[in-house]
Each structure stands twice: as C-alpha cells, then as structure tokens.
C-alpha cells in the first residue's frame, strides 16, 4: 500500500506533493525537518496534511504524484486548502 499526499504551509502559501509507503512516518520526518535540503525544510512554519489517497503499487503512486504536480493537479489540490 502506498500513499500520495499533499501538504500545505499557510505561512508561505506553499503546497508540497509526495508519495510514500508509510504516511505517518513521512509526516513526522517533514515536521522534524529531517531532510535538510528538502522543499519542506526550506520553509519554517507548520505543514498540514490536506489531501491523501491510497494506491496499491509504487508505480501507481508515482504516476498519481506526477498528475498532482501538474497544473490541473495543483488546481485540484487547491480545493482542499483550508480557508
């Protein structure tokens, strides 16, 4: 089981889309800024999980991640940003 997810940083109005096999662990790594040169560690403030979906294979997850990173995918994700 794989997850595709979107995080939102309200302070900087930024969206991050990624995929993982363990969503809980990945969210912790983002919050702790474990990946020092990653996109999410460049911005201070809290990253909120605004969207996630389950997929059965990594290939499907990578394909869906790519879709969500496209213009139409980002427009879809923006619907989930809290007001």
Image (cartoon, grey):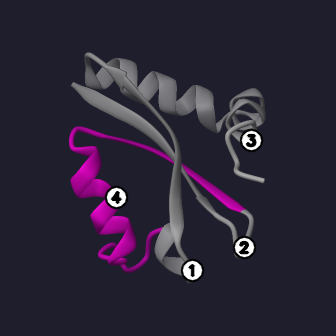
Mark sitting earlier along the chain (1/4): 4
Image-based side of 61 in relation to 28, left or right: right
Image-based side of 77 in relation to 4, left or right: right
Q: Does the magenta segment cover residue 12? A: no
Residue drawn 34% across the image and 73% down it? 35
Where is residue 8, by image quadrant?
bottom right
Cα distance between the residues tagged 2 and 4:
18 Å
Q: Does the magenta segment cover residue 16? A: yes
Image-based side of 53 in relation to 26, left or right: right
Where is residue 10, by image quadrant?
bottom right
Cα distance between the residues tagged 1 and 2:
8 Å
Where is residue 54, by image quadrant?
top left
Residue 48 x, y percent position in the rendering: 52, 59
The residue at which mark 1 appears reads as: 45
Q: Which mark is residue 78?
A: 3
Classify the position of the N terminus by image quarter. top left
**Nearer to us in this view, 72 or 79:** 79
Instruction: Let me know if residue 39 appears in the view.
Output: no
Region of the chain picked out in magenta, as a range: 14-38
The residue at which mark 2 appears reads as: 12
Residue drawn 55% across the image and 31% down it? 66
Mark sitting earlier along the chain (2/3): 2
């Amino acid at each position: 089981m794989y997850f595709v997810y979107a995080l939102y940083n309200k302070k900087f109005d930024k969206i991050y889309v990624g995929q993982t096999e363990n969503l809980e662990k990945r969210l912790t790594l983002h919050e702790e800024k474990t990946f020092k040169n990653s996109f999410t560690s460049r911005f201070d403030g809290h990253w909120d999980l605004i969207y996630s979906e389950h997929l059965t294979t990594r290939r499907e997850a990578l394909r869906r991640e790519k879709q969500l990173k496209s213009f139409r995918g980002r427009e879809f994700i923006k619907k989930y940003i809290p007001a």
